[in-house]
Image (spheres, helix red, strand yellow):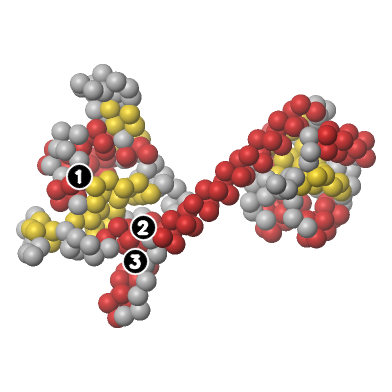
Amino acid sequence: MPRPALLLVDDEPNILLTLRRALEIEDYVVEVAGSGAIALEKLAARRFDGLLLDVKMPEMDGLEVLRRVKEREPALPVIMMSGNATLQIAVEATRMGACDFLEKPLTTDKVLITVRNALKLANLERKAGEERERARTAFAMIGGGPRMKAIFELIGKAAPSTGRVLITGENGTGKELVARAIHEGSKRAREPFVKVNCAAIPEELIESELFGHEKGSFTGATQLRRGKFELAHGGTLFLDEIGDMNPSAQAKVLRVLQEGELERVGGSTTISVDVRVVAATNRQPTPEGTCESHSP
């Protein structure tokens, strides 16, 4: 396995020398740069796994270097360093994409721990991105006929909006694929996509599944459990076969949709959730607003 490569950027030669020695002892490949301009040249010439970047430097300061780096390599973990930075500078660096901020004088242990954590987090994010891409590929929709083109057009209109979506169709027609395509095309694509098959969950357990429960709220509730709405916070909740959900649970789902709040079963604390609901059913809505089953 190749050793992680780091770039140190600081206009103080003693700091570069000390940090380089400490990191190389820990088996990192280390290059140094005495200015922002040299750092950008080195970043353009080869790939690095992490960047330690001083804020206060002549000609081009660390924030400008950070801005340019994030334009080229948004996933590169950048650790800022400064001896006299204000809180405002630290907040600005974080907003621009820095993953951590080290105050000078630096200690070897603090630097090593910060670098290790930054690389570990970047690796986890990379793997999560790969998993999302594999999932997107596995559930990709294909087809070039007129009806599929019409479906793709509808998905393209629905996905960027914040509206809730109801997908109707017989069993096996790909309703979940449409739901995932809507999620992937939305601003929530990097957040969770949580699926609930309402037809497969016993009526007495559906509320616990959706809203969670507190420890001891009923027989068998041996520990606190977060529901699907909480797990989908920030993302999309796909309620498959929602037409099979009992009226009591439907009323509670409606409250969550209206208020953006819920209470776990057996609990009294109000929990705020930000969830986009996409639902599906194999029943066809009637003019009266109820649902009737498709005939075979």
Is the C-beta separation of discs 2 and 3 under 8 Å? no
Q: Which numbered marker is on residue 180? A: 2
User: Around disc 2, counting alpha carbons within 10 Å, would you say few (fewer than 14), some (14 to 19), or many (20 or more)?
Assistant: many
Question: What residue do we see at 24% from left, 65% from top?
Answer: 173
Question: What residue do we see at 80% from left, 45% from top?
Answer: 29
Task: Describe the element under mark 3 as helix, strand or loop.
Answer: helix
The residue beneath circle 1 is 200
Q: Amino acid at mark 2?
A: Arg
Could you tell me if residue 55 is visible in this image?
A: no
Circle nearer the viewer, 2 or 1:
1
Is the C-beta separation of discs 2 and 1 under 8 Å? no
Mark 3 and mark 1 lie on one chain; the one further toward the N terminus is 3
Q: Amino acid at mark 3?
A: Ile
Residue sitting farthest toward the top: 216
Task: Describe the element under mark 2 as helix, strand or loop.
Answer: helix
User: How far from the left and from the top, in percent, is residue 229?
Assistant: 32, 40
User: How far from the left and from the top, in percent, is residue 23?
Assistant: 81, 36
Rendered position, 18 above or below 175: above
The residue beneath circle 3 is 155
Task: Describe the element under mark 1 as helix, strand or loop.
Answer: helix
Mark 2 and mark 3 lie on one chain; the one further toward the N terminus is 3
Question: What residue do we see at 62% from left, 44% from top?
Answer: 122
